[in-house]
Amino acid sequence: MADRAEKIRGCIGVKVVIMAQYSQVHQGVYEMGSGGSLTYHSTSTPSDPSSYGYFATGKPVPFPTNIEFEDSQRLIQQNVPAGPQRPVQRQPLRRRLGKTGLTIIILGTIVIVAACAILVYLWQGAEKARNRMPRGKEWDRIIFDNYVANVATLCSAAIRVSMIPQTCLTAASMAAIVPETAGCRLSDLARLSISRASSIDTSPWAIFLITKGNRKTLFHCIILLFSFLLSQAMNFTSTILLFDFETFPIAAPMVAKSISVGFDISKDTAVFSGVSYWQSRPSAHWRFAETRPSSQKLAPEDVADTGDVYRAMIPIADANDRTSLEYYSGPTIVTNMRTACVAPTFNNAKFEYVYTGSNATEGLYLHAEFNSSTGRESGPSINGSYPATLSCRINNEWDQTNSTSWPISLCSFNAKALAPKNNSFTNPLSRHPYNFHPVLLLNASDALHQLRPMNGPWMTATNENGTQLFQASVCFLSQNTPLLYNVAMTGRGMASEPTSIAKWKTLQGKNGTNLLKQLGIGASASDTEARDILDLKVLSGPESMADTGEEDWDDFIYSLIHFSLFDYRISGGWAFNNDALIGWFDTAASWPAHPEHSHLFQSVLQETDDPARAVQELFFRFYQMIFHDTLPYFTQQQAVSTINVKHVLIPSRWTGLIIVLSGVILHLALMLVIIIMFMASTKSSILGNAWHDVSQIISPETSAVVEAVSSSGMRDVDVAKWAKSTGSDEYMYGLSTYADNKIRRR
């Protein structure tokens, strides 16, 4: 029994010594009394934070000695259990990151990738639209419903909102990596612990400031600094993306609608008032569509022949809708105003100054009889079997000082006995015989003496000395019966149709280049895009303008056009030198065609030296005027499909998106690197768990600081000063790799 009691006392003695040694880290020492009881003796050591004195200023009073602190640390090291200890078991990654962390990583990445995919979809669609390539319907809906700025803003917001918690999580992960690997100063342990526990609001900058003084954490500092700078830069995602946007014209989705083209006989048709198209200014230089047969047979070289040119009217009244049109499919009127000019053969001709009793019509007239052979072989002729006659006023008073216009008159023949249709000469568009109608061009000069036929489309009259008096050319114009064709028009939108520039006294032959380019003068006739017109493809037809298909209705429309253009005239024709004509005011006001027509005719004639081309373009302009004048009176509903250009806000470059995507890729790469480091370097840290993180830093080496702070209200700056003064910050502290998971000095 005595031996057993002695052993018990020995064990108790060892225990008391150990407890006494451990208690020195706290604020006193336990000793064994004579009766076997433990007695606590308080001590005051300069190494204890609570022993820091304060003056009235609130500043701590440092103690220079550090001997007793070293003694207490030595005692703690002596209490480390001898022999091998069980290593810390690595916690599963799912437990270390927590549900919140995994959700932030997985869901945030999905949101970021989805937002980036939507942005790439927008940018790719914009590039396709600029290159006139097909794009998705959803893209069209976003763009043309004006949602593109909203979508880009929402995507950038989704990226930022998803990156913020991921950045905080990576900072918290780094806060867990540091104490389990390189360690940190004693004064920084609390902040690192809080950072691990607060995984959704930890800043990389805060962890960077903690680790920047440790050479072992240089790589960690670089990653944290990059992560912080990147998170700040990504706050400007929306602004960066908006730098890529600008208003750009692109083709809108196809629209199916109903328009009025032709006449519904069952409906009332308004009676439109007739106008003098010769003396009326065109309300616009309307856009049109054009094509030519791939192969055709032209007239001999001495005949000016335009060949077959198919031109379709655009049945749209609004100018903006015409200029923005890029596709049209449906019915419209198509013309083929083929024109051929030949040198006439006169049987006899004389000039006579006619006194009509009116200043408007009084002047010099040409009375002429033309040989019936005037025409071209296997083509139109002026008459069938007997001569045709003409009485037309010719220029005899003009001032050429400030004018480049030729003194030209365009005259109509007496139409009582013109040649019938040549049924063997067929219009390939309508598959009907051409309806050629002759007109005479007179380019005046001095007195008349004799006529002499010349090569080419012009006949020149000269006097006895060989001086040129005037030129004449008979042009056969194909007047179309207006018929409907089902067509497809394609092309590019344009800024605006050519504007009118002609004035009564300033008509110049070189003006109006946009108008000439539209007609194919000064530009390749086959390059419809350069001419700002549409390319035409005739799909089917012709069909009657009337829904019942009655030919009488078409003949009626034909007669109206013929009367407006050929039967209505003053002085037998029209003058085309408005800016040079002098004489009676009544003559200058009534005889010339409108200066807009004169400008067109003179410009084409002088640019091409082709009378057939000049007559063709002039009468095509008349047909356009008649069509658009009649457009409001159409009553037959037709289904059409159109595509128009709209100016919309779209991405016009990739610069901003590439910057944002680069930032996203760098962010994901940094997050991946940090998570891999967290997986490989940590065992016991559990992010987002405050109690667990706090329990790990409360150890024999930190308990004195914890108790002093709780009892005396020390601030972080006070703890930092104490740690510096005692030399404890010269050491690195980290989590133990053994089973206790406590902070140990390294």
Image (cartoon, helix red, strand yellow):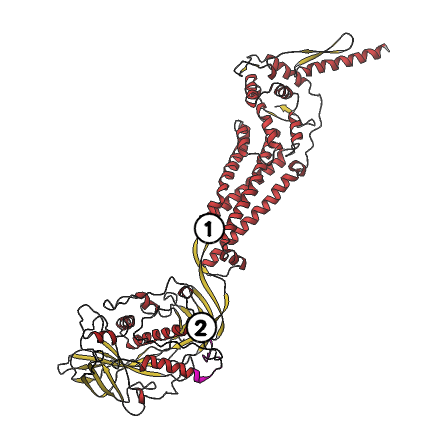
Let me know if residue 545 is in the magenta part: yes
Mark 2: give few (<14), some (14-19) or many (20+) Cα within 10 Å.
some
For residue 565, above or below residue 238: below
Task: Find residue 167 and report its horizontal and vertical position in percent.
Answer: 56, 38
Residue most extreme to the right:
1
Identify the secondary structure beneath mark 1: loop
Which amino acid lies under the numbered mark 1 shown in the image of this protein? Trp
Q: Is residue 305 left or right of residue 329?
A: left
Residue most extreme to the left:
465
Task: Find residue 644 and report its horizontal and vertical position in percent.
Answer: 45, 63
Residue most extreme to the top:
34
Q: Nearer the viewer, residue 329 or 117?
A: 329
Indicate the quadrant where residue 191 lies.
top right
Residue most extreme to the bottom:
385
Let me know if residue 174 is in the magenta part: no
Indicate the quadrant where residue 105 lies.
top right
Q: N-terminal of the two: label 2 or label 1?
A: 2
Residue 537 badge: 2
Mark 1: give few (<14), some (14-19) or many (20+) Cα within 10 Å.
some
At a point 71% along the width and 28% down the height, the residue shown is 86
Q: Nearer the viewer, residue 560 or 689?
A: 560
Number of marks present in the image shown: 2
Q: Which residues are magenta?
A: 536-553
Residue 654 badge: 1
Task: Find residue 561 and report its horizontal and vertical position in percent.
Answer: 36, 80
In the rendered view of the protein, which quadrant contains the C terminus? top right
Please indicate, yes or no, whether residue 181 appears anywhere in the rendered image: no
